Image (tube, grey):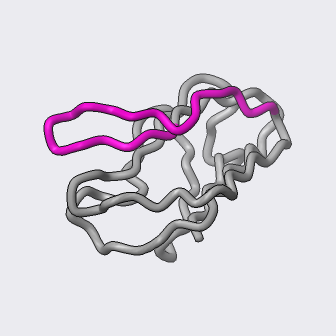
Amino acid sequence: MEKGLFNITEAGTTTLKPIYGEAGNIGSVSLANTGASDIVIELFLQDSIGQNAYIIKTTIPGNVTLVLEDDLSFDNSVLGLFLTTTAGGLSASTPLSVIIK
């Protein structure tokens, strides 16, 4: 998959930007629920010892896109960006599509 594009089809935690990964500014994150069921998401930063700082915890209704456009940049030398998804309509045919710009 192209860097910055993710199709998440199973509940769990996905690393969007690993700690100590390639640095870069994040201008926006788009989370599109392409299925009919709700998906619960938690977008957060995590440090090297596992402490989390949550950006957002919410439910995305079916067929709705959530776009976070505020400057989401962070120090990638000490933090990683992660997304946890739970329940809802996650399946191979109805993924949560994530675009990081």
Residue 79's x, y, as percent? 28, 51
Where in the figure is residue 82, as x and y percent of width and height?
Answer: 41, 45
Q: Nearer the viewer, residue 43 or 95?
A: 43
Q: Position of residue 94 (x, y in %)?
A: 71, 45
Q: Is residue 78 above or below residue 63?
A: below
Q: Residue at x 58, y 28 (%)?
A: 57
Main structural element of the magenta stretch: helix, strand or loop? strand
- Residue 51 included in the magenta stretch of the image: yes
Residue occupying the point 20% across, 63% down: 20
Measuring from the top left, give residue 48's x and y in whole percent.
16, 44
Q: Image point 63% across, 62% down: which residue?
A: 28
* Camera-nearest residue between 49 and 9: 49
When the figure is inspected, residue 86 is found, relative to residue 72, above or below; the finding is: above
Q: Quadrant of the C terminus?
A: bottom right
Name the quadrant containing residue 49. top left
How many marks can you see?
0
Pick the front one: 17 or 75: 75
Relative to 78, 92 lies left or right: right
**Could you say which is closer to the camera, residue 95 or residue 28?**
28
Q: Place residue 41 in its image quadrant.
A: top right
Q: Is 47 placed left or right of 101 in the picture? A: left
Q: Is residue 33 magenta?
A: no
Residue at image position (62%, 47%) is 92
> Residue furthest toward the top?
87
Looking at the picture, does residue 79 appear above or below residue 47?
below
Write the start and end of the magenta stretch as one range: 43-61
**Residue sticking out furthest to the left:** 49
